[in-house]
Amino acid sequence: MSTELALVTVQNKQAGLPKSIVLNLGWFDRNRTKFEDWWREIQLFLKNNRVNRTDNRITAILAHLRGGVAEIYAQKKLDELDEETDTQDWDEFVRKLKTMFSNKNKATNTEWKIKTFKQSKKHIANFMIEFEALVMKTNMDKLYTILLLKKNV
């Protein structure tokens, strides 16, 4: 455990806070369909435990990569961290991690869902919430999504 994480744990105990309010932070085991959920959990873990330094954030994430390609990626990245003397770029690390493990078909599948998503008998508020959630998962043009929204209501 890094000194920053140890310090946060001690501070949380002294403040009467639980060690972590993020329960069951699991391992990422190379299953691309579960990456998005795991990524959200790891972000909550980092935020809750006040892990702010880039090197500590990267180390915490690499510690939660297990099995197959994920484990090989973690080992390769750890080797790179040992060799480098410069500080790490958080945005670059996140971009590479997402490129490596995110579900690349998800955006395509979501675009298809948006195109076929109809209001039917749903309340308009429920329809809009679901529609906006789908749109957030894609990189579709805003004008095109407005056209689809008008078409599908």
Image: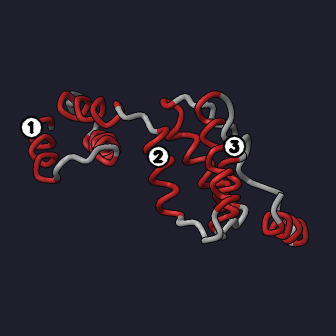
Nearer the observer, disc 3 or disc 1?
A: 3
Nearer the observer, disc 1 or disc 2?
A: 2
Q: Give the distance between the C-alpha atoms of the residues marked 1 and 2, in whole angstroms.
A: 33 Å
Q: Residue at x 34, y 30 (%)?
A: 105
Q: Residue at x 69, y 43 (%)?
A: 64
**Mark 1: which amino acid?**
Lys
Tell me the element at label 2. Answer: helix
| Residue 102 position within the rendered picture, expressed as x and y whole percent measured from the top left | 45, 39
Q: Is residue 22 above or below residue 123?
A: below
| Residue 2 position within the rendered picture, expressed as x and y whole percent measured from the top left | 81, 62
Colour mapping:
secondary structure
Task: Give whichever of discs 2 and 3 has the lower sequence position.
Answer: 3
Query: Quick check: 140 left or right of 110?
Result: left
Q: Which residue is tagged 1? A: 151
Q: Is residue 64 above or below residue 82?
A: above
Task: Give whichever of discs 1 and 2 has the lower sequence position.
Answer: 2
Query: Quick check: 142 left or right of 130?
Result: left
> In the image as oriented, which residue stretches furthest toward the front?
83
Q: Residue at x 67, y 54 (%)?
A: 45
| Residue 59 position within the rendered picture, expressed as x and y whole percent measured from the top left | 70, 55
Question: Residue 64, labelled with which disc?
Answer: 3
Q: Is residue 113 above or below residue 148?
A: above
Question: Residue 98, labelled with which disc?
Answer: 2
